């Protein structure tokens, strides 16, 4: 257990305050959230706070539902009087030789208003959908807030997605227009976004317009009548666009899940409840204070970017950093160079990035002055203790609390997480619930709630919180089926979980990833964690496959460190290693050397594909449109280790 460092603080929330606030939040949610909702500016204040029903067949979630509000006013206008000249967004471009930009709240206001007027000029109306296919440039934030200003619903599609994936999303949400850029520099290369959008639009209604931000000035094809030069038009329109009063329950955005477990779902988030929750978690979980420089290295194409680059920080009047590049360009020190340069106080990234940088050696981080850092965060998957220790030692220099935040696209914001000034941490545990969150652990087969403190099973949430998704776009049935049908009366997260005797939560991976070997249930994450603890291993992914004797066998895909060659001796060594780390039952039946693993664009391993390969059922891989590099799959199939 790592105690809160004695030098830390004064924090917004200490241990005693956490206990007090948490109790009130779950015992008297009306009073608690009624107060917290006031952190936003309302056009018409709400009188209702919570109106939620988790009953299958009747699921309905409403918060602050008679309140009237505008999200862009909360993220921009209301800060102008006090912090018009404060930097709202620091933009750090892909190429470190290009200058960073500091965009003040006043400039942000000007851009958002102008972009909103551009949208209006294109006939975008309240409730219309706008797909945003942009890289990590300030215009992405302007576009989001411009939509919010006029009541349009945005749906961001990650700029690394293919034309097919883009077309599917444009069609699924029935977007009226798509906002893109000419090309997107990333890691020294350029993605041809506009030509991808052109290709996608061939599969969409010819009414869909294409708004283009000329970011690099690279040459692009232009379809007159359909394409619009956004920057040129922003110069022409008025810098004032009255915000539209929105109901708290009007959708703010749709975001498709990463698709690691199936066809992506169009997750719908609300305006009022979502924004309250994003703002509150950003402040408390990172212990953000006025004047801090905060950096979340995620992409706006996934929910972390929505809640923790744009909406949460800007609602709080924070300075938020947007980074266009990658952690390894021009070298593996880039993150730390940016932290030093902008004196970053809170830094938030994913375990997959940490592991990748760890594999390159500590020399890239040691040479930078990271003394400004106060809090480190991770999100996306369980962080293995080795990566935690490396992050702590080399990045945090042993003095920064690490917040391991468990949450989902569906939850809108952090759900189980330490608070830096309140919660002692254990490497690999997301620790305790955030305010208002009631986690429960159920037996996966009997659905019986586990009341003992120490327990293991599936993770469900017993009651609603304001940031919860409201529906699946156009398919409320699928929403109920996916989240409320398995365990009646609960929101089902899809994740497995263990609660230790201190009441700390450990996410063990997706329920689908729990395997049963000769009657022993184990999370594949545990075996992976053991494998990556071996010095030769950079990454590992473990799945089950049908096994005649054991029911399920263990199939491990192993990526070795750069300088290590695969060999039979190493294979035996890894088997021995897992036996001693976990026990004989966890010894992999099959180890396949994998130069690359199939990952989603948000860095998650798509285990369902690995399962198919392990089962030798490669004819039906399902939707792989969200993969970062689909060629990895062919390579894995060609080199299957389990030829039987
Ligand atoms: P899909 O639902 O389409 O398969 P996805 O679940 O990968 O996509 P996200 O909503 O981005 O899409 O990911 C949420 C999931 O990520 C969680 O359910 C959990 O499995 C995992 N996760 C996120 N943060 C953590 C964390 N701190 N510790 C453990 N697991 C985490
Ligand atoms: Mg999911």
Image (spheres, grey):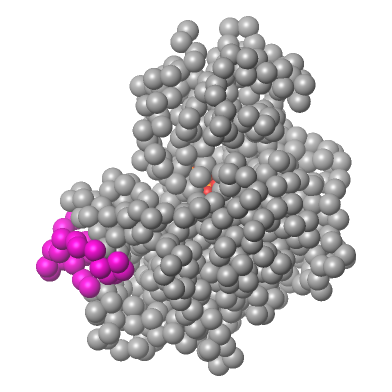
Q: Position of residue 575 (x, y in %)?
A: 67, 18
| Left or right relative to 377: residue 142 | left
Q: Position of residue 164 (x, y in %)?
A: 28, 45
**Above or below, 609 relative to 616:** below
Q: Residue at x 74, y 16 (%)?
A: 584
**Magenta-colored stretch includes residue 208:** yes
Q: Position of residue 104 (x, y in %)?
A: 49, 83
Q: Position of residue 78 (x, y in %)?
A: 54, 86
Of residues 236 and 69, the one drawn nearer to the viewer in this rendering: 236
Tell me the magenta residue range.
204-229
Q: Residue at x 57, y 88 (%)?
A: 83
Magenta-drawn stretch, dominant element (helix, strand or loop): loop
Q: Residue at x 47, y 39 (%)?
A: 599
**Magenta-colored stretch includes residue 597:** no
**Above or below, 168 relative to 33:** above
Residue 415 appears in the rendering: no
Of residues 100 and 152, the one drawn nearer to the viewer in this rendering: 100
Residue 500 appears in the rendering: yes
Examine the image and state in which quarter residue 561 appears.
Answer: top right
- Figure disc tally: 0
| Left or right relative to 93: residue 450 | right
| Left or right relative to 90: residue 368 | right
**Above or below, 114 relative to 217:** below
Which residue lies most toward the bottom here? 81
């Amino acid at each position: 257990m790592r105690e809160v460092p004695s030098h830390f603080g004064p924090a917004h929330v200490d241990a005693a305050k956490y206990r007090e606030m948490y109790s009130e939040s779950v015992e008297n949610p009306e009073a608690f959230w009624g107060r917290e909702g006031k952190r936003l500016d309302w056009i018409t204040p709400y009188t209702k706070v919570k109106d939620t029903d988790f009953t299958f067949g009747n699921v309905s979630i409403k918060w602050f539902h008679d309140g009237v509000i505008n999200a862009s006013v909360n993220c921009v206008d209301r800060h102008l009087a006090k912090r018009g000249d404060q930097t709202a967004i620091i933009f750090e471009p892909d190429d470190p030789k290009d200058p960073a930009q500091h965009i003040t709240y006043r400039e942000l206001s000007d851009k958002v208003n102008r972009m909103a007027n551009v949208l209006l000029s294109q006939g975008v109306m309240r409730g219309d959908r706008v797909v945003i296919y942009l890289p990590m440039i300030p215009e992405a934030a302007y576009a989001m807030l411009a939509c919010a200003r006029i009541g349009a619903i945005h749906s961001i599609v990650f700029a690394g997605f293919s034309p097919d994936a883009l077309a599917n999303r444009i069609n699924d949400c029935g977007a009226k227009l798509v906002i893109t850029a000419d090309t997107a520099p990333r890691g020294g290369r350029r993605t041809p976004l506009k030509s991808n959008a052109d290709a996608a639009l061939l599969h969409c209604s010819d009414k869909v317009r294409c708004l283009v931000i000329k970011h690099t000035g690279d040459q692009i094809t232009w379809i007159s009548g359909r394409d619009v030069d956004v920057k040129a038009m922003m110069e022409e329109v008025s810098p004032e666009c009255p915000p539209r009063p929105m109901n708290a329950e009007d959708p703010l955005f749709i975001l498709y899940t990463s698709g690691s477990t199936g066809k992506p779902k169009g997750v719908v988030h609300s305006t009022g409840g979502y924004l309250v929750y994003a703002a509150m978690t950003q402040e408390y979980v990172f212990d953000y204070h006025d004047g801090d420089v905060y950096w979340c290295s995620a992409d706006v194409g996934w929910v972390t970017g929505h809640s923790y680059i744009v909406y949460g920080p800007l609602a709080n009047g924070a300075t938020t950093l947007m980074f266009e590049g990658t952690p390894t360009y021009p070298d593996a020190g880039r993150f730390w160079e940016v932290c030093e340069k902008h004196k970053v106080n809170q830094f938030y990234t994913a375990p997959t990035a940490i592991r990748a940088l760890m594999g390159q050696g500590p020399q890239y981080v040691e040479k930078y002055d990271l003394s400004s850092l106060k809090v480190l965060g991770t999100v996306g998957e369980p962080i293995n203790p080795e990566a935690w220790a490396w992050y702590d030692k080399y990045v945090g220099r042993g003095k920064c609390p690490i917040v391991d935040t468990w949450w989902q696209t569906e939850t809108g914001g952090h759900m189980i997480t330490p608070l830096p000034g309140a919660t002692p941490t254990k490497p690999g545990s997301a620790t305790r619930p955030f305010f208002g969150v009631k986690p429960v652990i159920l037996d996966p087969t009997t659905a019986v709630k586990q009341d003992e403190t120490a327990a293991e099973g599936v993770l469900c949430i017993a009651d609603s919180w304001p940031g919860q998704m409201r529906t699946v776009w156009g398919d409320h049935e699928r929403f109920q089926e996916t989240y409320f049908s398995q365990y009646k009366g609960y929101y089902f997260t899809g994740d497995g979980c263990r609660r230790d005797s201190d009441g700390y939560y450990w996410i063990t991976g997706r329920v689908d990833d729990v395997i049963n070997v000769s009657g022993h249930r184990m999370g594949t994450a545990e075996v992976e964690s053991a494998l990556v603890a071996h010095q030769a291993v950079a990454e590992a992914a473990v799945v089950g496959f049908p096994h005649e004797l054991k029911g399920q066998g263990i199939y491990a895909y192993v990526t070795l460190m750069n300088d290590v060659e695969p060999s039979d001796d190493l294979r035996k060594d890894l088997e021995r290693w897992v036996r001693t780390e976990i026990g004989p039952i966890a010894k992999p039946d099959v180890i396949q050397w994998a130069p690359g693993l199939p990952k989603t664009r948000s860095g998650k391993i798509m285990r369902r594909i690995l399962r198919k390969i392990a089962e030798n059922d490669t004819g039906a891989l399902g939707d792989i449109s969200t993969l970062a590099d689909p060629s990895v799959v062919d390579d894995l199939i060609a080199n299957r280790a389990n030829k039987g």
